[in-house]
Image: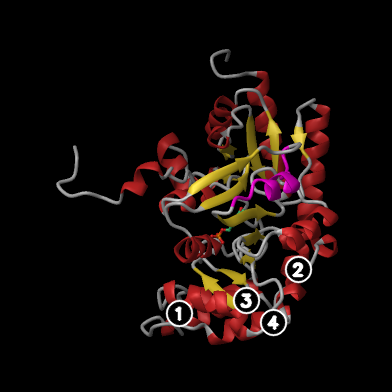
Amino acid sequence: MTLPFPINPALQNVPVYQPGRPIEDVARELGLPAAGIIKLASNENPFGPSPLALTAMQQALSGVHLYPDGNAFYLKQKLAAKLGVEPGNLILGNGSNEIIEFVGHALLGPGADVVVSQYCFAVYPIVTRMFGANLITVPAKSYGHDLRGMLNAITPQTRILFVANPNNPTGTLAERNALVELVNEVPPHVLLVLDEAYIEFLGNDAVDLVPLLRFGHHRNLLLMRTFSKIYGLAGLRVGYGIADAELVAAFEKIRQPFNLNLLAQTAALAALDDEAHVRKTREHNRAGLEFFTQAFRELKLELVPSHANFLLVRVGDGAKVFAGLQKLGVITRPMAGYQLPEWIRISIGTRAENERCLAALKMVLDFPAGKN
Ligand SMILES: *Cc1c(COP(=O)(O)O)cnc(C)c1O
């Protein structure tokens, strides 16, 4: 069936994002109670939202008949103070995914080039194609970004270079020197978008690039962060970008006036105060990474050393192992869509969830479907 009117031809080449499967979906399919299923598929916080955020939202509930502050004044003030930038350096998004789309609106069109790495976050190619731009994919190096190769791939038509650091789905981290070199050498006609969705998991090891944005230098640098991962607010959709005030002003023209709802603003504001929740999550995550790393080594399964809250592990037939785990009530992420068909990605869960996932994985690898 074709529609009786033309649609934007760029949409023909836009791949569809495949999210981690929701627990309720899998429960319905398997006829199992949702309570018996665990989700280690979308890098969410296993401890849930910050308790401070929950309390703040409960208090804000009776105000949802009013539109939220379209400019999210308090959230911007607080973030700006924490980061040491001006509120005018901050753009807030309905998740950082929305900011990726702002970037597309502001910079891309037919004829523009976008440079990404092999195994990059799936949303970069989607947004590139949505705006009819051309994707240049640079081969990965040991599953990580070849930053030098990416610089070399820049053309006169290149508008954006996307780097997630740590990267999703591989968990790799750029070396400090290579990162500094990238920031210094990216030519002025290219916007370097550094996606730092997992930066809080690095703790003191993180390279802080925010100071570069304080004095109007590095006008072609956009840092992106999110409340979806360590802050545990993925369901509320809050992300932010830190950039030159003039670039932010351009994004503000694209942004829908109420893109951050009232509860999202309230929760994010409160979560920023909950350093204990962040610290606990980070420490627990380190232990979880260690747990899986050791277990996979014992099982002689190849893994990519991860700096984030998930691990990529080579299991053979990724789709089959994903399906086998799912039957046992453990949702992970198959990786064929990332050209990694032999791998699955496992998010770090609670200790009990990690143990259950490992036991299920051993079972699936010992008794692949068809044999039992
Ligand atoms: C999870 C993730 C995000 C965050 O997306 P939100 O829209 O903020 O939930 C952004 N970039 C990468 C690489 C991610 O893995």
Q: Which mark is residue 244?
A: 3
Q: Is residue 147 magenta?
A: yes
Residue under label 2: 209
Residue under label 4: 85
Q: Nearer the viewer, mark 3 or mark 1?
A: 3
- Is residue 349 visible to us here? no
In this rendering, is residue 35 above or below 139? below
Q: Nearer the viewer, residue 124 or 21?
A: 124
Residue under label 1: 61
Check mark 4 vs ligand 1: CB closer than 8 Å? yes or no: no
Where residue 109 sits, quadrant-wise, is bottom left
Among the two numbered marks 3 and 4 on one chain, the one whose residue lies closer to the N terminus: 4
Q: Is residue 95 left or right of residue 146?
A: left
The magenta stretch is 143-155
Q: Is residue 299 left or right of residue 237?
A: right
In this rendering, is residue 316 above or below 288? above
In this rendering, is residue 228 above or below 20? below
Among the two numbered marks 2 and 3 on one chain, the one whose residue lies closer to the N terminus: 2
Where in the figure is residue 81, as x and y percent of width and height?
Answer: 70, 84
Q: Is disc 4 surrounded by few (<14), some (14 to 19) or many (20+) residues within 10 Å?
A: some
Q: Nearer the viewer, mark 2 or mark 3?
A: 3
Q: Residue at x 80, y 60 (%)?
A: 180
